[in-house]
Image (cartoon, coloured by chain):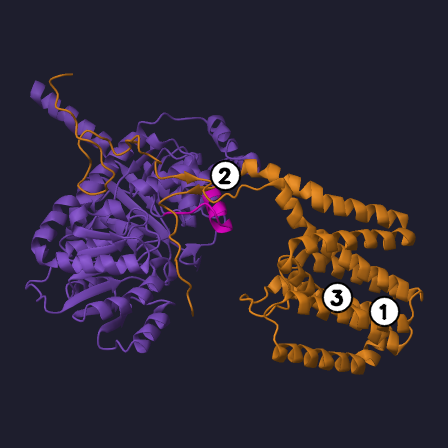
Chain colours: A orange, B purple
Amino acid sequence: MEGSPPRPRWRKVAYGGMQPGYDDNYTDESFLEAMVMNSNVVKRDLLKVMRDSVSISQYLCVVALVVCVWTYTLGSIIDEKLLLSLDAVLLGLGFLVLLLTERRLSLPLLSKYFLNIGFFICGLYVLAPLFHTLTRSISSDSIWALTVSLLIVHLFLHDYSGSIIRPPGAPNNPTLTSNISLNASIVASVLIASRLPSRLHVFAIMLFSLQVFIFGPLVIHCLKQYSVKAHLWFSFTLTCSTLAIIFPINRLVFVIFLGLLLFVTVVCPYWLIRMQEYKFEIEGPWDEAKLCFDITE
Amino acid sequence: MEQWQQTLMKIAMAVQRRHRVLMVSDFFYPNFGGVENHLYYLSQCLLELGHKVVVMTHAYGTRTGVRYMTGGLKVYYVPWKPFLMQNTLPTIYGTFPIVRTILIREKISVVHGHQAFSTLCHEALMHARIMGYKVVFTDHSLYGFADVGSIHMNKVLQFTLSDVNQAICVSHTSKENTVLRSGLPPEKVFMIPNAVDAAMFKPAETRLSREEIVIVVISRLVYRKGADLLVEVIPEVCRLYPNVRFIIGGDGPKRVRLEEMREKNSLQDRVEMLGAVPHVQVRSVLIRGHIFLNSSLTEAFCIAILEAACCGLLTVSTRVGGVPEVLPEDIIVLAEPVPNDMVQAIGKAIRLLPKIDPQVMHDRMKSLYSWHDVARRTELVYDCALSCSDENLLVRLSRYFACGVWAGKLFCLVMTLDYLLWHLLELWQPSKDIEEVPDIASESLHEEMPWSVETEAI
């Protein structure tokens, strides 16, 4: 074909009518040239994912420990005096960890914390008689069933990456799901507390549960921010002690709990890594542009 | 004798080539927008080329039944009420009887559906395919792949497109997007852009002075149109260029933010906010300015910049979607959707302004875009669709089956039920009992019965 003039190059334009020499359904070599695949995919490392999953198994242990304390109290193995001293020790330890790890902690902030906790304890003490008789007309089976489901909801919606009580200076507000999670745990504590024999029992167990559910995540978060090594050691000790406490209660529960921990720290990370192969993300000029600044309404 | 025979042959060919098209979309006059515009002008130009065009859309308020528009364009306003954003409630089978009746009454040969959001379009195309009609689909929009909404939308699109004869997209970027979303072979997808009615968008008779430079924005003030970018860009431009003024036409949820920005920077005398601008007044707003600013975050084609360029305005736009394909490089300044970059682009446009002659630009746009060209190219697509071989139901079902593990089986079930429904309808109301409409030539329509038909012009 020497005689024919070379046809003009195809251009990726919409104007000027049909391009001479090319039909409208012509597909150029440059077709889909601007498509990018899997550009946002993060390469994950099994060890790192496993280390991150420790936060979850650690919190599972915390909840398991709370349930153990509940069962022991209901079985009158722990009496109210021991429980109250446990509360005091936990509170002291929590503040100690906060003082040691948080650099931004100032005196006014600390006094604010103390004041809030003072109000909190007084309020709880006043309300204890109310909690004591709150669910008298409901059978214990229903209470247990409800408590278990609320705890499961709590565990599913819990914000494992942070804590609902923000350390000073943290920017984001807690999300809706983490609020629901916290509320579920509080309702569960109220339900359990209402099964106890005396008002002091109710007060002590409520104080204990709320300390763990509200301030526990904050303390754990601060510890993790401070040093990952300390966090890992703490998790390890916590896991071992939880397993040791569960073992005498029920063998089956022990086995199930051990399985759950293994599932969370070994199987799930492995799954996540394996699933990365199926990642298929397409990006291109057709995507909606993202604004590079925050919109302040 | 031989010559006479040849003429006869030519006439026979012409008659054969005359398409009888049913345009289906939820979006049509009295609503306004890119799709509505496209449908109206395409239909008008196809009528001029001698084809028969019938439009089917849903009822708008009290506007139901059959109406005639300019040039004898027949519109069926099917009495289905819209329920969300002008879309009819998706019933899958509910529209079958009326679609079938219209197809038979009007002796349709090609069904042309518009816009992926339109439920009526999807349903009509499905029924038309079951009845063995050739179908063409035009996609007017871009869609991502990431969020839950678009994943489902894309599945629906895949369902419709897995069996269309040809598809049309309004820009090359849109074609890439559609091919990815639907898995159609790229040869089946045509690129035919929108156009602009140059007669409606003429530049101002007298040239504006350049002492004060006016930047016009006409768009719905919503997130997708980049209203938040405007909030960042306008104060900065006003600070850098003291002789610049803004005119903003359009309404929407982000209008409050723009007004807030105007208050905060005391720009009341330099930023004029017009509120919603009816389409007929768009030109009168455009010709008050020198530069047109488009801040969309996503756009398949963008008719607005076409209209602005046709009025002789220099365009500054974000480089998104199909926008870079729309205008030649010398009459558009593109910027990334970042405030700084857009401010720089506006500065560049202001420096370019002395070289721009609106009348020259208008004439150039006239040569670059015309609805007649669009209609001729669409005609070719119809020819292509008609030359496709007929396939039996089993072959087509296998194509639906390949759509996905679960979706494929579901699609097959939906189509099989539709097929059964079709035969049921045939029993209930045999197609030979449906009266066919006599064709009325568009000229005679105006002359003979001006009292009986309502003719409306857009």
The mark tally for this picture is: 3
- Whichever of labels 1 and 3 marks the residue nearer the N terminus, that label is 1
Callout 2: helix, strand or loop? Answer: loop
Q: Is residue A23 left or right of residue B162?
A: left
Look at 85% across and 77% down and name the residue there.
A133
- Are marks 1 and 2 in one subunit? yes
Determine contact: label 1, label 3, CB under 8 Å.
Answer: no
Between B379 and A3, which is closer to the camera in this rendering? A3
Check residue A212 in the rendering and tell me which mark sits there, or answer none. Answer: 3
For disc 2, the chain is A
* Image quadrant where one finds the C terminus of chain B: bottom left
Dividing the picture into quadrants, the one containing residue B111 is: top left
Depth check, mark 1 against mark 3: the one in front is: 3
Image location (x, y in percent) of residue A181: 68, 63
Horizontal side, residue A110 vs residue A39: left or right: right
- The stretch drawn in magenta includes residue B30: no
Q: Which residues are magenta?
A: B142-155
SS category of the residue bearing label 1: loop
The CA span between labels 2 and 3 is 41 Å
Q: Amino acid at mark 3?
A: Val
| Residue A125 - label | none
Mark 1 to mark 3: distance in Å?
26 Å
The residue sitting at the top extreme is A1
Q: Chain of mark 1?
A: A
